[in-house]
Image (tube, rainbow, N blue to C red):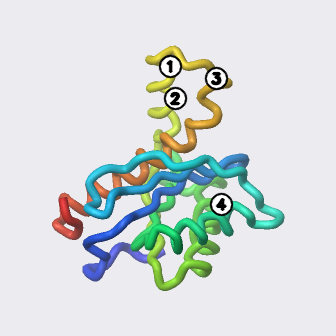
Amino acid sequence: MPAPSSDTPRYGVRLGVDVGTVRVGVAVSDPEGILATPVVTLARDEAAGRDIDELVAMVADRDVVEVAVGLPKMLRGADGVAAHAARRYAATLADRIAPVPVVLVDERLTSVQANRIFDDRKVSAKARRAVVDQLAAVTILQARLDALRSTGRARG
């Protein structure tokens, strides 16, 4: 995936995606690019690709201008198995939603952060399973929104 260019859309809804082996968390931004909020957790469907189909529909339905997919690099910054899988997922999604850009966002420790929040709030493992991926997607998307604002490439 290429780095964001100066023609990155400034205004519009963005989608954040946390890709897991079992579930895919999804978050969405407001059109101004200020705040990421959770949307849904999709069942991962590597065989039939229903999760990708659902994301494609969301991109169209919400007039999404960019999708940020989490890239789970290892702590030292190298790509591992999960990062390679996320890159493949992002490439497949990019092919399906072109010309809407798909960018990769370093998501080291986003699931750890999400689980810490749940630990602090004493949320059971069973209760958090349905929403931890959404919270990770929010963290990924919020990082992208903050980066765009800090470089002046997004409103807010």
Q: Nearer the viewer, residue 14 or 18?
A: 14
Q: Earlier in the sequence, mark 3 or mark 2?
A: 2
Tell me residue 129's x, y (percent).
64, 32
Tell me residue 24's x, y (percent).
62, 51
Task: State yes or no: discs 2 and 1 in contact (Cβ < 8 Å).
Answer: yes
Task: State yes or no: discs 1 and 4 in contact (Cβ < 8 Å).
Answer: no
Q: Earlier in the sequence, mark 4 or mark 2?
A: 4
**Spatial CA span between label 4 and label 2:** 22 Å
Task: State yes or no: discs 3 and 2 in contact (Cβ < 8 Å).
Answer: no
Identity of the amino acid at label 4?
A: Ala
Identity of the amino acid at label 2?
A: Asn
Residue reaching furthest right?
47
Q: Which residue is mark 4?
A: 85
Q: Is residue 84 left or right of residue 155?
A: right
- Badge 1 crowding class, 10 Å Cα cut-off, few under 14, some 14 to 19, many 20 or more, is few
Q: Nearer the viewer, residue 64 or 99?
A: 64
Q: State the quadrant of the C terminus.
A: bottom left
Which disc is residue 115 wearing?
Answer: 2
Q: Which residue is mark 1?
A: 119
